[in-house]
Every structure is written in structure tokens, then in C-alpha cells.
Amino acid sequence: MDYKNSGVDIEAGYRSVELMKQYVKRTMRPEVLGGLGGFSGAFSMKGIKSMENPVLLSGTDGVGTKIKLAFLLDKHDTIGIDCVAMCVNDVACAGGEPLFFLDYIACGKNYPEKIATIVSGVAEGCRQAGCALIGGETAEHPGLMPEDEYDLAGFAVGVVDEKDIITGADLKAGDVLIGMASSGVHSNGFSLVRKIFRMTEQTLRTHINELGSTLGEALLVPTRIYVKALRSIREAGVRVKACSHITGGGFYENIPRMLPEGKHAVIEKNSYPIPAIFPMMAREGQVEEQVMYNTYNMGLGMVLAVDEADVDRTLEAIRAAGDIPYVVGKITDGEKGVTLC
């Protein structure tokens, strides 16, 4: 009897690491010390010495049940982007610069090529965010998970000078809300998605005219990463007063998180185009509008508040980073919360 006979293939683990090295290499930053394969990842903090009071920020998340679609379609090269996005967007909306990322893959059986493909997506997400993939773990769990399934989670660390942390504390009535377009459903609410649509390969591979793609392609579009856009705003000299990553809980849960007491957000629903996947989901699942806005991003992955005088510079900076901005509302005095009109 040996470890392999119990269901854990150590040699497959070694091969996975070798296969993924080519992807990890693309994410390296000058601060990374050593290479992949050590017991820990090392990242020099020399570069932040110029900050008055550097503060570390962290974010951790997974992909949720969106991963079930990757199983059904046997498509594993983008799910890692979702994992990175969910973590680094949280760091970025606090004003932070993501520095490095670690991933954790739990699988029923280690298929090296599949694991390497998953990590290729993680590396691509890190490349988009400008952070380094400095380590991770692949754990084989025979008997706990089906052999052809896996779960994916990650952890990001970033840094910000304390004076630049986005807190919402100085919000005032008249400040303008700007939303950045999402790429689709992102990585939230897929338990409801899987109730709305039949989760079969045939359904997911069916071309839908109103989507311009198959249903599976529309649902698996990876989460948009907004790190470059927020960096571009900062480099344009604009102070973002408040920022919200629109994730699980949609508008009604996430917008109030960026508001101080006594400030209210008003968002105009017709101020930006809603991607076709959302009306389709509402129709096919008979989901009420309030539930849709309380579950999904509805086409805006990030909402931020700036002074009215900074609107044009903010829009220009977002476009320069390759994202699409919309003026979607304003801040008023009133009870902490959000109104959609």
C-alpha cells in the first residue's frame, strides 16, 4: 500500500507544478524573491518605503457555484480570472494597489493538465491586475470530492498609504456617482442562475440570438478587473471619495457599504445599458426586478463617488484604462441607503 493507492498521486502534483510555471512566470514583479516551489512566497516591501504610512490590505474569495458551468462545458481557462477579480477588486476599491496573490485548488483527482489550465486563468487575472502570483496549493481530496470536480479560492494582498484609503468619510450631497460597466454576471448569484436555466451541456451550448453567443459563453465571461481603471483615476489626480464593488447582494447591499451615516445614494436605472443576459434571466426565471438588483451587478461592476468638478477627468481616466464609464447618479443628504429610480 502507498499514497497513490489511497487516491493521492504525488507525481501528478509535481507535474502540475512544472506545467503551471510557464504561466506563473508571466506575473512576476521585481519585488518577488525566489521562485515557485518554496514553502512560502517572498515579496520585498522595499518599494513602499516612500509612503508616509503604508497600510496592507487583503481580500479573499472564491468563484462560487459558477464553477459548475466550467465542469459542464469542460472549460477551465477563465475561471481563475474570476477568482483573482473577486479578491483584487475588493482591495482596489479601498484605494489599494494589489501586490501579490495566492491560490488554493482542492480537487478530487489531480489531472496535471487541467490544474495547469486553471492556473493559467489565475495568472491571466494577476497579469490584468498587475500583481504577482507568488504561490499556491493544490490539494487532492479522494473520497471527499468527485474525481472530475475541484474548487478554487484565492487571497490577495495590497498596499495603500493611509491618507489615500477610500472610506467615504468626506462624501457630501452633490457628489457624483460613476459606474463602470461589468462584463456580465461576474461571479455572484449563480445558485439562482442554475435554477433559472437547465444546467445541461445542450442548454449551455445553445446559441441565443439576443445574447449574440451561446448561453454558456455569456455566463462564463470572466469577472472584469478594475484595478487599472482605479489606478488611472488616481494618476489623473482625482480623489475617489467612496467606492463599491458590486458583488453578491447587488446594489442594495453593496452601495450602502460605501456611505457614511447621513448620506444617501440615488441611482438612475436608465442611465446606462443593461446587458441582455439580465433581462433574459428575469424573464426566464420570473425574477422580480427588486430581487435582480439585490442579487446581481445589473451591468455595473464598480460604482464610485467623486466631486462634481472631477467628473470629466474621472470619465477620461476610466476610458484610458480600457473600461466603460457612466454617470449613474448622485449623493444626497438622508438616511444611509440607496434609491434606484
Image: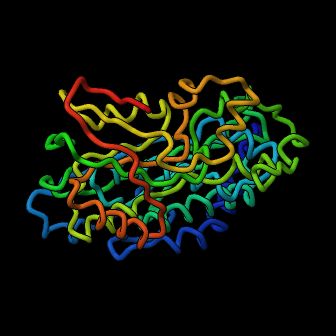
The answer to which of 128 and 35 lies nearer the viewer is: 128
Residue 25: % across, % down: 52, 73
Reply above or below: 222 against 4. below
Q: Quadrant of the N terminus?
A: top right
Left or right, residue 191 beside residue 207: left
The answer to which of 97 and 309 lies nearer the viewer is: 309
The answer to which of 290 and 103 lies nearer the viewer is: 290
Q: Quadrant of the C terminus?
A: top left
Say which residue appears at 31% left-offset and 33% top-offset.
257
Residue 29: % across, % down: 39, 73
Residue 218: % across, % down: 72, 50
Reply above or below: 283 against 61. above
Q: Residue furthest bottom?
A: 30
Left or right, residue 207 beside residue 196: right
The answer to which of 176 and 182 lies nearer the viewer is: 176
Say which residue appears at 16% left-offset and 58% top-offset.
161
Reply above or below: 75 against 24. above
Say which residue appears at 81% left-offset and 43% top-offset.
72
